[in-house]
Image (cartoon, rainbow, N blue to C red):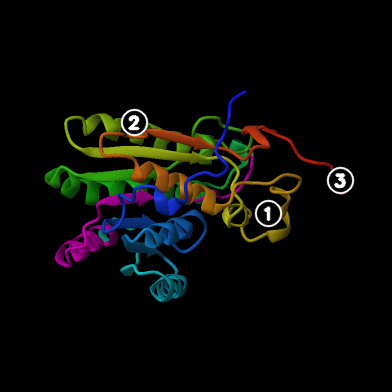
Amino acid sequence: MPTFPDSLPAISDIMNRIEGRTVLVTGATAGIGEACGRRFAREGARVLLVGRRTERLDALATELADTDAAEVHTFAVDVRDRGAVEALRDDVAARDLLPDVLVNNAGKALGLELLHEGDPDDWDEMIDTNVKGLLYFTRAFVPAMVERDFGHVVNIGSTAGRWSYPKGAVYAGTKFSVKAITEGLNMDLVGTKVRVSSVDPGLVETEFSEVRFHGDRARARTVYQGYEPLRAEDVADAVHYVVNAPPHVDVFNLTLLPTAQRHSMVVHREESGS
């Protein structure tokens, strides 16, 4: 019979290749982005938090400064604004804060309708955020990584970029785009030491569904009933693993699901009250 250790190594016993690195996280005011900011700060990285909600950025920065021996900087930037992204690049370059790691996390789903009945305004916002925002940040910050011949881009994708689903065609389309962009960027960087990865989660309980349903919290809660979904911290753990891999290792794609989920359309839910 195989034998197993009584316990796994503590995180502190695993080599920390992140300490002292500069990590930029977009969409850092909530959910996966916030969890990534916390995780990298805990590992001793210099963290650049990017988001639209200044109050949340400031609160998170204050909390991290009080609890972690990390350097934290905040930037109120809308990823959809190309000029603002370029100005951010110039700002951080002037302050010697160009990132070693770029986590393209900012993204959203809006609406859940049949494609032919969908809201084009929702489509525009998803495409501008999920696709164009990711492209703007990649274009802004990867050239410096290439020049230094060192860096890592982590795109937060989704299982929706693997499997589309009814009433989710446009959101899935944006995440299929992220998959294609990740693959293309990875090939374009061959011959450099700049790594490219995607982390693609399934059902994660964050503000995601509340945003999708335009603030309808009651409807959002039904998405996560009857099973244990992923938490933002679970995804942050996966991002940490990918970034902390040895320099000769590129974890190109990591897909994670809650155990109850086996496909976008296959989720085991316990009966209410069981």
Residue 270: image location, x then y, percent: 80, 41
Q: Is residue 186 visible?
A: yes
Q: Left or right of 126: which side holds 99?
A: left
* Residue closest to the far left: 147
Q: Amino acid at mark 1?
A: Ala
Q: Which mark identifies residue 274?
A: 3
Query: How far is the residue under mark 1 from the one under mark 2?
Result: 32 Å
Q: Left or right of 44: which side holds 122?
A: right
Q: Amino acid at mark 3?
A: Ser
Residue at 58% across, 38% down? 257
Q: Amino acid at mark 2?
A: Glu
Residue 22: image location, x then y, percent: 27, 58
Residue 265: image location, x then y, percent: 66, 32
Residue 185 falls inside the magenta stretch = no
Give residue 263's quadrant in the image: top right
Q: Is residue 79 visible?
A: no
Residue at 40% across, 61% down? 42
Residue at 32% across, 34% down? 250
Residue at 28% across, 33% down? 186
Q: Left or right of 157: which side holds 220?
A: right
Q: Which residue is mark 1?
A: 220
Query: In terms of secondary structure, where does tag 2 sit?
Result: helix
Q: Of callouts 3 and 1, which one flags the residue occurring earlier in the amino acid sequence?
A: 1
Q: Which residue is mark 2?
A: 183
Q: Nearer the viewer, mark 3 or mark 1?
A: 3
Query: How far is the residue under mark 3 from the one under mark 1?
Result: 21 Å
Span of residues in magenta: 84-113
